[in-house]
Amino acid sequence: MAGIYIHIPFCKQACSYCDFYFVTRKRLIDPFVDSLIKEIHSYRDTLYSNENIETVYLGGGTPSQLSSVQLKRIFDALGESFSLQPVEVTMEMNPDDVTPDYLKSLLDMGINRASMGVQSFDENLLQFMHRAHTKKEALAALESLQTAGFPTYTVDLIYGNPGQTLEMLGEDISQLLQYDPPHISAYSLTVEPQTRLGKQVKLGRISPPEDDLVAEHFDLLTKRFSSAGIEQYEVSNFSKPGKEAVHNSNYWNHENYLGLGPSAHSFWLLDDGGMRWENRSDIKNYMDDLSAGSSTDPEKLSMYSLAEERLMLGLRTKWGVGFDELRTRYNYELNPKQESWIEYQKEQGMLKTDGNVLRFTSEGLKIADLLIVDLLSKS
């Protein structure tokens, strides 16, 4: 199974917390689509077009800034260049872009999973995040999603915001659960240095909440979602059974994927390791000289580094990582220090082994990133 990620780098405005690559110049959309189609066609009759493409993900930026006509041009080019056999085609969208007619056009062209960036229903928090939509627009968008007929969809929430109380988060959760979503991605607000939020924190104008309060936010999320039949399957992802994200799961399992568009990343597994490369985060460069858009120095990844990456990504999920997989796929064996650390964490209730598989417990998942760094430091 292989996937394609397409970065659509257009937004109405800059969210205060976001450090993804984007531009706000809508006049560039048409020439960008032309360049994207050229990049798609450049992969015809290559090693990368031989595999069946089973997942496509349109991220950003804000893909819903593109019209249905522009999106159809992109999908036509994909069909001309790759063997598309999609089980999941996801498109990110913002509530203020959504109308019933637009959603129907997306379904008609084969997009079968929507990713709605709600983040919060609290008007003050939406303004703090500098989101372009209102609570009213978010509610209307979710109504439209429910009636449009998407086989599945996901909604994004952000918790751990400055000034966000448990009561405020509880209201967001209650509002969202009224729509009975099949999948939710819930992210703790991260302060990135180059964002508006990062600069305000550095200047002392904003203080992020204490870690203990963020942990309480997380506990509330997991408890409320679980009660609604929406179970955690990855640190930041929750779903009803069978509604887990296929495309993202492929990232965690080291399946091949191509990244198209400025700033997009690609990964391809080789017999003796892997290769990862990225397109530059520069739309002018991308449109002026497509050959210069890709990194000229792809990163070659050894089996050892891939094994550590597989541990890092796999342990963030409910499925964990199999010892046999590490041994046979990556020729990787845990050393005595790591084995001793694992036994200690099992005694502390953070880890468990089910037969051949190593997994975090629900308590371990709360601090998964810290524990994974500790495990890999023993190698």
Image (cartoon, grey):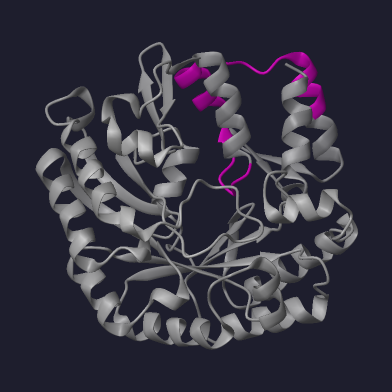
Q: Position of residue 265 (x, y in %)?
A: 43, 34
Q: Which image quadrant is residue 128 in?
A: bottom right
Q: Position of residue 303 (x, y in %)?
A: 50, 15
> What span is in magenta?
316-341
In the figure, is residue 93 to the left or right of 119? left
- Name the foreground residue: 278 vs 362: 278
Q: Residue at x 17, y 30 (%)?
A: 50
Total numbered circles: 0
Q: Which image quadrant is residue 152 in?
A: bottom left
Q: Is residue 129 visible?
A: yes
Q: Residue at x 19, y 31 (%)?
A: 43
Q: Residue at x 21, y 39 (%)?
A: 40
In the figure, is residue 333 to the left or right of 215? left
**Does residue 324 show up magenta in the picture?**
yes
Q: Position of residue 311 (x, y in %)?
A: 61, 31
In the figure, is residue 5 to the left or right of 50? right
**Vertical order, 197 against 269 (above or below):** below
In the figure, is residue 301 to the left or right of 345? left
**Vertical order, 26 against 79 (above or below):** below
User: Which quarter of the image is occupied by the C terminus?
Assistant: top right
